[in-house]
């Protein structure tokens, strides 16, 4: 019975010796160490070959070019080449294990007959090496199908990363194969593949242990993938949320409201990180707008917005994004913005309204497409109700007078009055139901502007309409 350790490295000449030495210095020595040079163009390959020449436990593997999906390709083959009852663990090329990691993990697994065990990590600054924090469980957990849904928040942080864990090889092989299939699909996971791997391994495992001790050191660097925006990252957040839900269904048979809310919270904070990285990236404005649209229009985000949870956190996330989108006046036409709102289900602007005239103009586009939508009609009423001149106005009337109404919302009553008068002078066909509210609006605008001649004009119209309705109808 041996432990299989795997490290894949790309241009890691500054850190990989620290990782290698931590493995070779383990108090449990019956191990084989796969060191994978993932197409490095620095001295990483030479370092691997140097250590392989010194220690026969090291098996060097060289890839000719960098492959972001190396985890799902090589490791299944590694697992196949070893026995089911062997053990597997991973170590990133810039991290390290404490000397007792394997010994203590193995002892814990044997004591409780576990298929997988997770331990905690120290967090250190990559530049200074200073320890700046730690993450470990408050107590020991032995997870089975009977309790795995009852303490999800306590152990889920230890599902997020592939390192800091030891698996039986058969459990790891199942997860490797699942990841390989996923990465061969049309919607492959780009960011968070280690979380996907761990969820698959925990799905396969009958008994899982959480060891309340830090046995791993994680070095925080801004060069980490966590700080880079890559195509597919937004999709990956959704995949991980869905995979977490599938994990609970397979292990516990269902998802409780409490656990659903917890996974939505995890998803919310993932979105926060993704949006931060996207906004700080060198991507074009159009790419950023497309990314924001992708986030807000998917079913997972709509579900998050719909649920009455994390109100403050959602507000803190969505407010800046709604404001940012609203400021991209040169990038979005009103029609394009309307399409944005249509796809997001109005949610982004319910969190942070646009300038009211732009909101109204988008609603105009949307109402023309869906004239009977109660949501859009309600939104019209909400926009109008903020302005005394428009209180009580019906959505259809607001649509009919869209140009003058927009001028009112812009704070330009003179322009609004002028457009109403032009409409009347052109003898446009005005539905009977709109005649009275149109004249009333003209009267109110004239009074607000102290324009006596215009007020008299609309007053005469009001009398004419009144007399017209009083005229006896012919039989």
Image (spheres, helix red, strand yellow):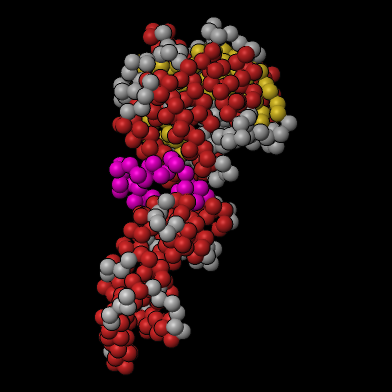
Q: Nearer the viewer, residue 471 or 121?
A: 471
Q: Can residue 49 be seen here? A: yes
Q: Position of residue 162 (x, y in %)?
A: 50, 26
Residue 438, picture quadrant: bottom left
Residue 309 covered by magenta stretch: yes
Residue 213 covered by magenta stretch: no
Vertical position of residue 49 compared to residue 407: above or below: above
Residue 170 shown left or right of residue 473 in the figure: right
Q: Magenta residues?
A: 291-320
Q: Position of residue 309 (x, y in %)?
A: 30, 42
Query: Which residue is drawn at the image coordinates 54% and 13% (left, top)?
Result: 169
Residue 463 shown left or right of residue 61 in the figure: left
Vertical position of residue 232 compared to residue 331: above or below: above
Q: Position of residue 178 (x, y in %)?
A: 56, 23
Q: Main secondary structure of the magenta part?
A: helix
Question: Looking at the image, which residue sits at the far front?
Answer: 475
Residue 267 shown left or right of residue 78 in the figure: left
């Amino acid at each position: 019975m041996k432990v299989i350790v795997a490290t894949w490295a790309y241009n890691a000449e500054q850190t990989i010796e620290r990782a290698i030495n931590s493995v070779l210095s383990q108090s449990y020595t019956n191990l084989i160490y796969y060191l994978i040079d993932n197409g490095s163009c620095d001295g990483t390959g030479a370092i691997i070959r140097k250590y392989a020449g010194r220690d026969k436990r090291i098996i060097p593997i060289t890839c000719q070019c960098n492959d972001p999906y190396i985890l799902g390709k090589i490791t299944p083959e590694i697992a196949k080449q070893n026995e089911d009852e062997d053990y597997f663990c991973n170590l990133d090329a810039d991290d390290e294990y404490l000397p007792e990691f394997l010994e203590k993990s193995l002892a814990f697994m044997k004591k409780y007959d576990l298929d997988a065990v997770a331990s905690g990590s120290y967090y250190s600054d990559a530049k200074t090496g200073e320890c700046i924090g730690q993450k470990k469980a408050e107590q020991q957990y032995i997870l089975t199908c009977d309790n795995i849904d009852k303490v999800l928040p306590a152990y889920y942080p230890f599902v997020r990363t592939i390192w800091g864990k030891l698996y039986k090889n058969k459990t790891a092989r199942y997860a490797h194969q699942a990841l390989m299939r996923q990465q061969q699909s049309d919607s492959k996971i780009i960011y968070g593949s280690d979380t996907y791997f761990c969820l698959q391994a925990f799905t396969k495992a009958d008994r899982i242990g959480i060891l309340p001790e830090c046995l791993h050191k994680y070095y925080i660097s801004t060069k980490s993938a966590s700080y880079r925006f890559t195509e597919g990252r937004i999709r990956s957040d959704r995949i991980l949320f869905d995979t977490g839900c599938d994990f609970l269904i397979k292990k516990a048979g269902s998802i409780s409201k409490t656990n659903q809310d917890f996974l939505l919270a995890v998803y919310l904070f993932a979105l926060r990180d993704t949006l931060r990285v996207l906004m700080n990236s060198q991507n074009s404005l159009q790419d950023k707008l497309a990314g924001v649209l992708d986030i807000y229009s998917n079913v997972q985000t709509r579900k998050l917005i719909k649920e009455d949870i994390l109100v403050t956190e959602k507000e803190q996330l969505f407010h800046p994004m709604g404001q940012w989108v609203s400021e991209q006046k040169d990038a979005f036409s009103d029609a394009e913005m309307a399409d944005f709102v249509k796809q997001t289900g109005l949610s982004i602007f319910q969190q942070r309204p646009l300038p009211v005239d732009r909101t109204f103009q988008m609603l105009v586009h949307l109402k023309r497409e869906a004239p009977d939508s109660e949501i859009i009609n309600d939104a019209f009423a909400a926009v109008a109700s903020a302005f005394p001149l428009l209180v009580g106005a019906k959505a259809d009337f607001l649509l009919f007078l869209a140009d003058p109404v927009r001028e009112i919302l812009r704070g330009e009553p003179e322009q609004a009055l002028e457009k109403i008068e032009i409409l009347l002078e052109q003898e446009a066909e005005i539905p009977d139901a709109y005649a009275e509210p149109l004249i009333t609006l003209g009267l109110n605008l004239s009074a607000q502007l102290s324009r006596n001649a215009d007020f008299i004009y609309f007053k005469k119209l009001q009398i004419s309409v009144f007399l017209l309705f009083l005229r006896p109808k012919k039989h």
